[in-house]
Image: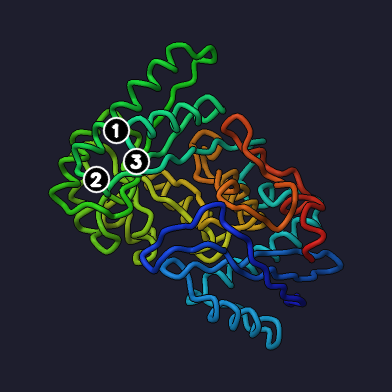
């Protein structure tokens, strides 16, 4: 078993991604190929500084894996993601099974629900975008908050809740519409307490209300109002530390940042066992990594009932393949039936 080929790539974003280090217009990475007993597998490393190692560190780790047989370690999670995903793909292809079937304890679901994400716009813009998402089939909508005064954000959430409540009343299938909000660490402790108290009963959870390093602050917020989810904090704390600190009601798991599908799945199972909801999302990855994340979500306990942040393909203007093997339809993503990650969908990448 060895890494036999590396192939660089770059995909353009539909709109620039704002980060603390500046706007990102392109996601660049490496496709990894492995051969195991005649079966070929592919994996994707798309590093995102702040979440993973740097692009140069990632490439160096992958070249050592190819040239010297040294597997990437925890200091290079994106590189490790690529190699372990490729192994998973090859093993599953060799067995003639989908990756989710090799990960799940039991039979994986045929599809998983996804949440739509609505940006930080005006009240009217936020309501319109949320209504569009629901009309296209999404049953969970996540709103960006945290850059405005708390009262303005609460007003935006209430306006969406009012609008979608009316839509739900007229909905023939009877499915409830859930709201989530994501503050991206934008509040201090006082503002976060006010926000969570005001949002209680309106939202499923508030994601990352405080800065990533404030684990104690997040623990103190639990029970104040709306439930707490942690995302950016997982770049600094292991899921086990979050659980031990009692700092979250939900954790947002990014397989690229955690070092691969198996590690993300293990973290999700540990969270679920502790009564903390695991939600899988991406780091705005290309098609191979997005598809791998879908398999992880499908393998989690209740993975087909909890909405995951996997509807990120439309954030890209270009991608690795012309046809997304795990597209969103009516707010859900079909889990590719295999073999491997997605049958022959990624054959041209190997």
Rendered residue at 53%/38% (across/down): 114
Which sits earlier in the primary sequence, circle 1 or circle 2? 2
- Which residue position is annotated with label 1? 156
- Which residue position is annotated with label 2? 148
Rendered residue at 43%/29% (across/down): 128
SS at badge 3: strand
Give x and y (percent) for residue 318. Answer: 66, 55
SS at badge 1: helix
Q: Are marks 1 and 2 in contact (CB under 8 Å)?
A: yes
Q: Let me know if residue 266 appears in the view.
A: no
Q: Residues within 10 Å of mark 2 (few under 14, many from 20)?
A: few
Which sits earlier in the primary sequence, circle 2 or circle 3? 2
* Residue 7 vs residue 103, the one in the foreground: 7
Give x and y (percent) for residue 16. Answer: 49, 57
Rendered residue at 62%/57% (across/down): 286
SS at badge 2: loop
Give x and y (percent) for residue 263. Answer: 53, 61
Q: Can you say which quadrant of the picture contains the N terminus? A: bottom right
**Residue 242 lies in what quarter of the image?**
bottom left
- Which residue position is annotated with label 3? 181
Rendered residue at 44%/34% (across/down): 141
Q: In this image, 60 relative to 5: left or right?
A: left
Distance between mark 1 and mark 3 Cα atoms: 11 Å
Give x and y (percent) for residue 40. Answer: 80, 65
* Residue 167 vs residue 108, the one in the foreground: 167
Which sits earlier in the primary sequence, circle 1 or circle 3? 1
Q: Residues within 10 Å of mark 3 (few under 14, many from 20)?
A: many
Q: In this image, 287 relative to 145: left or right?
A: right
Looking at the image, residue 13 lies above or below residue 159: below
**Residue 117 lies in what quarter of the image?**
top left
Distance between mark 1 and mark 2 Cα atoms: 10 Å
């Amino acid at each position: 078993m060895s890494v036999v080929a590396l192939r660089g790539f770059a995909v353009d974003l539909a709109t620039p991604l704002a980060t603390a280090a500046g706007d990102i217009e392109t996601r660049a990475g490496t496709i990894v190929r492995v051969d195991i007993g005649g079966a070929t597998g592919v994996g994707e490393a798309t590093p995102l500084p702040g979440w993973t190692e740097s692009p140069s560190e990632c490439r160096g780790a992958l070249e050592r894996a190819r040239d010297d047989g040294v597997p990437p370690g925890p200091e290079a999670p994106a590189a490790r993601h690529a190699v372990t995903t490729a192994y998973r793909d090859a093993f599953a292809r060799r067995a003639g099974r989908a990756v989710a079937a090799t990960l799940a304890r039991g039979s994986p679901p045929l599809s998983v629900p996804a949440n739509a994400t609505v940006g930080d716009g005006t009240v009217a813009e936020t309501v319109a975008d949320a209504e569009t998402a629901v009309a296209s089939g999404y049953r969970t909508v996540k709103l960006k908050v945290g850059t405005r005064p708390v009262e303005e954000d609460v007003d935006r959430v209430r306006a969406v809740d009012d609008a979608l409540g009316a839509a739900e009343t007229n909905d023939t299938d009877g499915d409830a519409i859930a709201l989530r909000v994501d503050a991206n660490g934008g509040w201090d402790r006082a503002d976060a307490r006010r926000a969570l108290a005001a949002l209680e009963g309106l939202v499923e959870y508030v994601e990352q209300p405080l800065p990533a390093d404030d684990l104690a602050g997040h623990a103190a917020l639990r029970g104040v109002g709306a439930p707490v989810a942690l995302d950016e904090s997982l770049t600094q704390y292991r899921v086990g530390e979050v659980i031990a600190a009692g700092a979250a009601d939900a954790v947002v798991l990014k397989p690229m940042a955690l070092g691969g599908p198996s590690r993300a799945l293990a973290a999700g199972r540990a969270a679920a066992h502790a009564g903390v909801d695991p939600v899988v999302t991406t780091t705005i990855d290309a098609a191979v990594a997005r598809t791998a994340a879908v398999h992880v979500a499908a393998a989690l306990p209740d993975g087909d009932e909890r909405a995951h942040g996997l509807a990120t393909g439309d954030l890209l203007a270009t991608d690795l393949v012309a046809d997304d093997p795990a597209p969103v339809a009516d707010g859900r993503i079909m889990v590719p039936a295999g073999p491997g990650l997605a049958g022959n969908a990624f054959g041209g990448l190997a």
